[in-house]
């Protein structure tokens, strides 16, 4: 059995295509969520896998655990507490009553406290050993998660004892070409987590070079491209994507613009970004919307009471279909726009990092607010006319999606790599 462990929206985006491919090829695969807060019942990708007969569950429900009646009660309280918190929209962006906020916070804190208790009492080495043994684990596939998260460390430890290979798979596309891309980044130990895995998979040579220079053994790092953005999965994803927008419903003649934001701790100039929202709202001939990053947490407050529509509840894929133009700072969603031939404006002035797509010349680089206004006005008059070339776009997409090999069968390569890891 090939086991895949997920925890959040982004890693599910990148791991689902691999599980789908392996299930089609009749390999035994299971998906276990290690984050008890995640809503696995309302994730369209996980439900798609379930419909194909793949086991999808919380790891805390996994196999016959024999931990006793009290454990069953504790496990129920953990999952129920977080379910209540979700229902009360504790992490949502819509308006809530004072009572719902308080109850949601209480449910969240209760679930977190009980989970910490359960980790120490129940989810120990014996539990991990039994889980791996009973599941018939051949390979354990995580995302690039830090071992200290959830029950990752104990699973890695027991897998090593039992000679079960562990693989770290991408949970995003690394695009930055400078060092220390986050505000609180430190050079020392920045990529130490990767040393805990037997194999590390990355999409492009850029990230392999970065983590190998940091001290990760180069022989354990493999460049295989992007499962999320390869053509095979994008075609399939389009078929199963839940639809919330009428793509042909806007007949106003306005230029449709979506701003895909990046989380503030990636050295974002927040005040200047908020001013950019105000500028976008002044255009009479542009319909602009804001899509906060999918990992947006406490900073969700800054997206309230904006002069533009917050479309956090709509898929980035559907927004990319809808939009005439996409605005980005440091997000891999630019790949979605470029693969569709949509103009991509990179607002370089809103952060202090540098990106691979700007160095490849695969986007419209915007250096200040005046350039943004001029670019949007130009696109309003001549839709689709951009100053960067198709050749640069194709060259960068080949690098980031196919690991530098334009003809690569990405999903097949991932499948073969995982299967061969278990056979070695």
Image: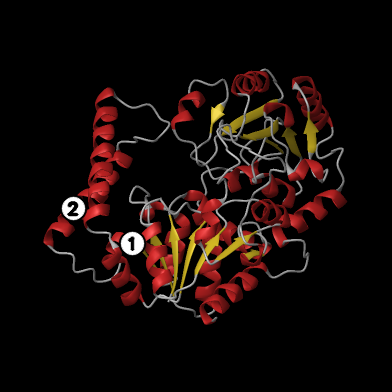
Q: Give whichever of 262, 335 is nearer the camera.
A: 262
Q: Who is closer to the viewer here, 39 or 129?
A: 129
For disc 1, the marked residue is 59
Which of the two discs, 1 and 2, labels the residue nearer the N terminus? Answer: 1
Residue 139 pos. (x, y %): 47, 73
Report the quarter where the N terminus lies.
bottom left
Determine which residue is flagged by label 2. 74
Residue 270: image x %, image y %?
59, 23
Q: Secondary structure at mark 1?
A: helix
Q: Residues within 10 Å of mark 2 (few under 14, many from 20)?
A: some
Q: Is residue 75 left or right of residue 310?
A: left
Q: Secondary structure at mark 2?
A: helix
Q: Which quadrant of the structure image shows residue 266?
A: top right
**Which residue is pictured at 64% across the width and 29% down the height?**
288
Left or right of 378? Residue 298 is left
Residue 317 on image: x %, y %: 60, 48
Kindly give the residue lying farthest to the left in the view shown: 69
Report the side of 136 relative to 301 (left or right).
Answer: left
Between 86 and 202, the residue placed more toward the observer is 202
Would residue 54 be visible to someone looking at this image? no
Q: Position of residue 393 (x, y in %)?
A: 81, 50
């Amino acid at each position: 059995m090939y086991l895949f462990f997920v925890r959040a929206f982004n890693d599910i985006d990148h791991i689902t295509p691999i599980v789908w491919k392996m299930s089609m090829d009749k390999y035994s695969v299971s998906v276990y969520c290690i984050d008890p807060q995640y809503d696995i019942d309302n994730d369209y990708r996980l439900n798609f896998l379930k419909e194909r007969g793949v086991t999808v569950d919380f790891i805390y429900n996994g196999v016959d655990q024999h931990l006793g009646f009290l454990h069953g009660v504790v496990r129920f309280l953990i999952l129920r507490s977080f379910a209540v918190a979700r229902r009360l929209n504790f992490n949502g962006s819509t308006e809530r009553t004072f009572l719902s906020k308080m109850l949601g916070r209480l449910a969240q804190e209760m679930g977190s406290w009980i989970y910490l208790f359960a980790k120490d009492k129940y989810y120990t080495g014996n539990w991990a050993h039994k889980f791996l043994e009973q599941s018939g684990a051949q390979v354990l596939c995580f995302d690039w998660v830090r071992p200290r998260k959830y029950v990752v460390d104990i699973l890695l430890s027991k897998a090593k004892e039992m000679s079960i290979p562990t693989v770290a798979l991408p949970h995003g596309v690394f695009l930055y070409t400078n060092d220390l891309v986050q505000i609180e980044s430190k050079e020392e130990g920045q990529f130490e987590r990767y040393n805990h895995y037997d194999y590390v998979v990355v999409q492009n040579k850029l990230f392999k070079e970065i983590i190998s220079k940091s001290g990760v053994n180069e022989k354990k790092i493999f460049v295989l491209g992007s499962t999320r953005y390869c053509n095979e999965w994008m075609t399939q994803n389009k078929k199963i994507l839940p639809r919330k927008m009428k793509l042909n419903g806007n007949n106003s003649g306005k230029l449709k613009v979506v701003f895909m934001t990046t989380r503030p701790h990636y050295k974002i100039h927040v005040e200047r970004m908020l001013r950019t929202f105000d500028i976008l709202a002044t255009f009479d001939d542009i319909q602009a919307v804001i899509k906060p990053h999918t990992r947006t947490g406490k900073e969700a407050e800054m997206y309230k009471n904006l002069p533009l529509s917050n479309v956090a509840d709509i898929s980035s894929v559907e927004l990319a279909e809808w939009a005439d133009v996409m605005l980005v700072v440091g997000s891999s969603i630019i790949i979605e726009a470029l693969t569709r031939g949509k103009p991509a404006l990179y607002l370089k002035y809103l952060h202090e990092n540098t990106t691979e797509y700007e160095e490849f010349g695969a986007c419209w680089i915007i250096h200040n607010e005046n350039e943004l206004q001029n670019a949007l006005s130009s696109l309003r008059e001549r839709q689709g006319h951009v100053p960067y070339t198709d050749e640069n776009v194709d060259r960068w997409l080949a690098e980031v999606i196919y690991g530098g090999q334009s003809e690569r069968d990405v999903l097949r390569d991932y499948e073969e790599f995982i299967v061969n890891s278990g056979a070695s």
